[in-house]
Image: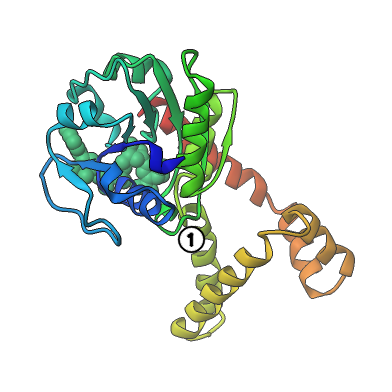
Amino acid sequence: MLSEITVGVIGTGQLGRAMAQGLLMGGLPGSNLWLANRSGAPVTLEGGAAVTQTTDLAALGAACDVVVLAVPPAVVPSLSLELRDRLVLSVVAGLTLDGMRHATGAHRVIRAMSNPAAERRLAYTPWVAGGAVTAEDRATATAIFGAIGVTDEITDEAHIDDFTALTGPVPGFVAYFADSMIRHATAQGIPEEIATRAIRQLFLASGQMLKEGATPAGQVQEMVDYAGTTAAGLTHLRRGGFDAALSEALLAATEKARTI
Ligand SMILES: NC(=O)C1=CN([C@@H]2O[C@H](COP(=O)(O)OP(=O)(O)OC[C@H]3O[C@@H](n4cnc5c(N)ncnc54)[C@H](O)[C@@H]3O)[C@@H](O)[C@H]2O)C=CC1
Ligand SMILES: O=C(O)[C@@H]1CCC=N1
């Protein structure tokens, strides 16, 4: 599937570059990939020798079946794109399906939210399709987003803003939790280098152990039911307003996505 399409990524920064690298690792031939940025600065990608790099957005749009918007939200109005006959995918925070149609002239638009883990093919990319999107377009989007990680089509466009908060940043809020544990450890007198190594390993192991098996809720309950030392802490956490504080933080990020 990927070998049958040509993809153009506009924006080769943190996310665009990561998606491009993940696509190449996931089977998109370099000769089928165009990249555009504002400066013309060359992008170095593993397996990217045959990639076409340009600052000419019109040339990219003419050459590519699928165009991916990966520029900052504020840049979109200045892009002056004419992509009427193209499938356009966007990972731009806050750019709605209507905004995509207005900015690109495209009818076939898919709004998504990915993250830079795409470079390691570990992204989570939910997406919602505009009305003119065909079954073939859905298969194309699934192939593209599936090449860079895990993907789901969703039906409520508003949830893309929620995912912009939840899974857009990586490590994002999880880095905050890890740092909070490191700061706790150092406050007990544990040397920062040791604390950092310990918590890095904890999150590496936790990520692997949360990949499958019991859900996070199930794994928490298992520890509470075990009624050991961890249960004492988790019970305290449950009572202490952590969930509400995190939800408020995520809602703040979601609201920012809706107003950016
Ligand atoms: N960085 C992240 O972790 C995530 C970013 N996003 C979204 O992805 C989009 C891109 O974000 P980043 O990659 O972080 O931005 P960035 O600032 O790292 O890169 C922006 C890229 O856009 C290019 N660009 C700017 N104006 C342009 C123009 N007129 N024509 C062509 N290229 C132009 C720049 O040259 C640069 O390559 C944003 O909308 C952001 O909300 C979404 C999820 C995660
Ligand atoms: O923080 C941001 O604006 C971007 C969008 C989601 C994650 N990073």
Q: Is residue 7 visible?
A: yes
Q: Quadrant of the C terminus?
A: top left
Count of numbered tags: 1
| Ligand 2, image quadrant it occupies | top left
- The spot of residue 23 in percent (x, y) is 39, 49
Q: Please determine whether, in this image, residue 40 is positioned above or below residue 153.
A: below
Question: Which is nearer the eye, 93 or 150?
Answer: 150
Q: Between residues 48 and 205, which one lies in front from this camera angle?
A: 48
Q: Which residue matches tag 1? A: 175
Residue 176 point in image, percent of width and height: 49, 59
Give 224 or 51, whichever is nearer the viewer.
Answer: 51
On the image, the x and y values in percent for residue 3 come to: 39, 43
Label 1 within 8 A of ligand 1 by Cβ: no
Instruction: Tell me if I can see residue 252 in this picture.
Output: no
Q: Position of residue 204 (x, y in %)?
A: 56, 70
Q: Residue at x 16, y 26 (%)?
A: 58
Residue at the location (44% across, 59% down)?
Answer: 120
On screen, residue 82 versus residue 260, left or right, reads left
- Give the residue type at disc 1: Ala
